[in-house]
Amino acid sequence: MESVGSRADAVRLALLLTYITLGWMTIEGAASLLLGWASRSLLLEAFGIDSVIELFSAAVLLWRLRIEASGTATSEHVNVVEHRAARLVGYSLYALVVYVVLNSGYGLFIAKRITDTHESVWGILIGAVAKVGMPILAGYKLKVAARLNSRALRADAVESITCGYLSIVLMIGLAATRLLGWWWLDSVGALALIPFLIKEAQEAISGECDCCKAQ
């Protein structure tokens, strides 16, 4: 059985990882949204909105961890908070799906939105940093989640994994648009995110993702 001290250490580490997530998502989200609006890039905008969703997820997780760290929460209360956090993250991912579908359709069939590739280099740089950092952060979260048996922390780790996946699509989409000049590629590339986002949303809401089963 895990000692009280060991669990307290795990909670403190989880808090540190959550603070790192909050800081990075604030920077990543603001930069991606500003560059996306400036360059009319749906990929960058979607990446920025995903960062906002992750920021929200991390904020909910911070609330949950602070409750346990205070020593005043019952296990039932913690379970309720975790369940609520996972469902909120799942519904937020569904909101991102709707946003991407509507904006892709608008860009492809109505406005024929042309991406300004002058900002692509900065967008690719953001994606590269996320591709390197997010899997590492997610790995630590999954290990601590196993120690705490925390479904909320595991769900938040899935958000970090999602960010790493999105960064690959972002870099490929921006690079191809810049090199090939295909105005429609940005919107089509964003649509490629839909299956993965739906899968993650379903798993967050149901609590049946693979990472949640791992102990």
Image (spheres, grey):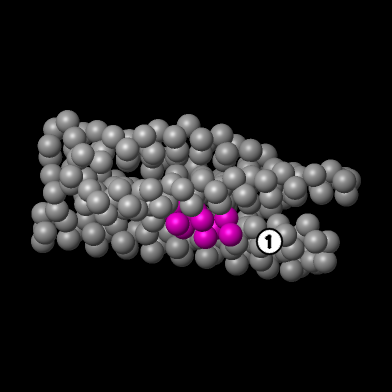
Q: Is residue 22 among the parts visible in the rendering? A: yes
Does the magenta run of residues contain 51?
yes
Instruction: Identify the amino acid type marked 1.
Output: Arg
Q: Residue 148: percent from the left, percent from the top? A: 74, 49
- The quadrant of the image that shows the C terminus is top right
Looking at the image, residue 127 sits to the left or right of residue 154; the answer is left
Which quadrant holds residue 198?
Answer: bottom left
Above or below — where is 131 with respect to 85? above
Point out the stretch of residues depicted in magenta.
Answer: 50-59
Does the magenta run of residues contain 61?
no
Seen at 51% across and 46% down, the residue is: 24
Q: Which residue is mark 1?
A: 64
Within-10-Å neighbours for mark 1: few <14, some 14–19, many 20+? many
Seen at 49% across and 49% down, the residue is: 25
Looking at the image, residue 125 sits to the left or right of residue 139; the answer is left
Seen at 87% across and 46% down, the residue is: 5
- Element type where label 1 sits in the image: helix
